[in-house]
Image: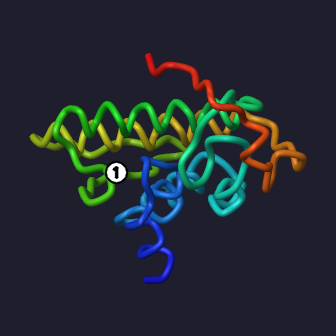
Amino acid sequence: PLMQSLGAAARPLSFIWMVVGATGSFGQMRGCVGTRTPLAYIRYGCYCGLGGHGQPRDAIDWCCHRHDCCYTHAEQAGCRPKIERYSWQCDNQNIVCGESPNKCEELLCKCDKEIAYCLAQTKYNLKYLFYPRFLCGKDSPKCD
């Protein structure tokens, strides 16, 4: 409840949604393909956590930047990433998005699946945990 209310206030789109989300799906996905808790990413680098700007610091930060871009794209397509739910399964450490006639559910599951796999391939650098955002700069990479 408290974490969900914090998530509801998050703007712009941010990784916090993947930690708590409307259904908690990301945290569960993360457990399917990796071992790190989603809480390890709440204030990591320049993009993991509330908001995001500047130059991503490492591979984890790039995963979070891409995820922010994916959610922005979903919003532009008329989806509501912070509210919409979707179904998925963990099958032998593979994330399988549920079939849905709803394009938004499909897109949001894809966004969350991509960041879960992306983070699973990274090395965690403690020096970027609670990284001071003022060091991130103002110029942000464009979304693809």
Q: Residue at x 26, y 58 (%)?
A: 85
Q: Callout 1: 10 Å neighbours few (<14), some, many (20+)? A: some
> Quick check: 138 left or right of 83?
right
Q: Residue at x 52, y 30 (%)?
A: 66
Relative to 78, residue 31 above or below: below
Which image quarter is the C terminus in? top left
In the image shown, does 24 or 75 lie closer to the viewer?
75
> Quick check: 77 left or right of 74?
left
Q: How many numbered marks are there?
A: 1
Relative to 74, residue 105 above or below: below
Q: Position of residue 99 (x, y in %)?
A: 20, 42
Relative to 54, residue 31 above or below: below
Q: What amino acid is found at the position of numbered circle 1 in the picture?
A: Trp
| Residue under numbered circle 1 | 88
Q: Residue furthest left?
A: 101
Q: Position of residue 93 (x, y in %)?
A: 56, 45
Q: Position of residue 131 (x, y in %)?
A: 80, 49
Helix or strand or loop: what does disc 1 sit on? strand
Rendered image quadrant of residue 35: bottom right
In the image shown, does 95 or 73 lie closer to the viewer?
73
Which image quarter is the N terminus in? bottom left
Q: Position of residue 101 (x, y in %)?
A: 9, 40
> Quick check: 64 left or right of 56?
left
Relative to 116, residue 130 above or below: below
In this figure, which colouring scheme has been used for the structure? rainbow
Q: Residue at x 64, y 58 (%)?
A: 42
Q: Residue furthest bottom?
A: 1
